[in-house]
Image (cartoon, rainbow, N blue to C red):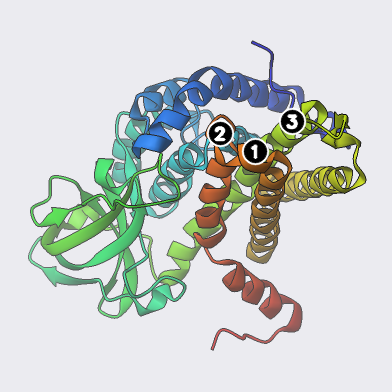
Amino acid sequence: MNMFEGADYFDVESLLSEEEVLIRNSVREFVSKEIIPVIETHYRNGTFPIELVPKMAELGLLGITFPEKYSCANLNYVSYGLINQELERGDSGIRSFVSVQSSLVMYPIFVFGSDEQKNKWLPLLGKGEKIGCFGLTEPDYGSNPGGMLTKAEKVDGGFHLNGAKMWITNGTIADVAVVWAKLGGAVRGFLVEKEFKGFSAPEMKGKHSLRASVTSELIFDNVFIPEENLLPKTEGLKNALMCLNQARYSIAWGVVGSMMTCYDTALSYAKTRIQFSKPIAAYQLTQDKLVYMISEITKAQLLNLQLGRLKDKGNAKHYQVSLAKRNNCEKALEMAHISREILGANGITDEYPVMRHAANLESVKTYEGTHEMHTLIIGENITGISAFE
């Protein structure tokens, strides 16, 4: 099997360390051997390839930025970005699993949890022995999470939790949910374990996007949460948004993997598809599309790398993450559509990955902050004026 080469028009690889290249290549090979051969079947059947979880854990892909004492790899954020990039070449659903486990479950436990919570959960999640999910979005509150209706009430020995969450990746298969709820008017984080009475997580069906990913509702019917399952360092909605910022970072990198496979598919097809006695790559209109694609890939790669370097120095700002997520998701979806155009009718078949990526990217552009929300985040930063209300 030949190694997928990716697209690297500006020799971005020369800006990576040897370790970063090695990590990227190991995940690139894993995707080619383990994900690509099975993903179309899972997508068609609407199933998540859960058999890949222990394999990804063995590679060290879960929670890679956390310390080794928690059975994690303690790698940098550029490496984490490259991992997400390669996984999304396989499928957005696989990248989403790793992103949620690492950025939305392990991260809040690591940052806001007690030592006991960190020692209990992080090794289990890092080794893939437990699966987590993140409960913030509600049926009526997506872009405005501060309006959440889910509430916790203090009782003897803990809390009673009531409410519901929606569009929750990994929810049905999760062993623990990081759930955000209002306690006395303040948003706090809770660890809700799957066996808690009154907690259910039915899977949402009928999706045309992210079909190889588990998407669920979370329902809390007077669920008793022990005192020790409150994330003690949470003190408001800003903590939940910090977690989203981590996930947005992984998405910004991830969609470049979708860009690369759509571009690679379109370029290969255009060079071999003969119309009017020559390959369609010989026509100016096709070349214009391919040049646009490689240009946007290159911009996104450089954007991500600088963002990753800033993040590794502790200097990345939330609005910089928003810019990367906003730009890269928009361009990735555009490129999936352009790739489908180049492939013509063949582009709608699962012989090629393009239509699957296009459908997935419709969701990826929306979740963890819509295009419009990221526009307003950046707009507020550059003008000093909030336009959210």
Hey, which quadrant is residue 279 in on the image? Answer: top right
- Marks 2/1 in contact by CB < 8 Å: the verdict is yes
x%, y% of residue 383?
A: 74, 83
Mark toward the start of the polypeptide (1 vs 3)? 1
Residue 288 in picture, x, y percent from top left = 88, 48
- Give the class, few, some or many, for how many residues have Cα within 10 Å of label 3's Cα (few <14, many ≥20): some
Name the residue type under label 3: Tyr
Query: Does residue 77 appear anywhere in the picture?
Result: no
Determine the residue positioned at 12% across, 60% down: 223
52 sits left or right of 90 in the view: left
The front one of 246 and 272 is: 272
- Residue 109 against residue 160 in the figure, above or below: above
Please provide percent x and percent y for residue 378. 69, 72
Q: Are the residues at dot 2 and dot 3 in contact (C-beta closer than 8 Å)?
A: no
Residue that numbered label 1 is attached to: 257
Look at the image and tell me in which quarter the N terminus lies.
top right
Tag of residue 87: 2
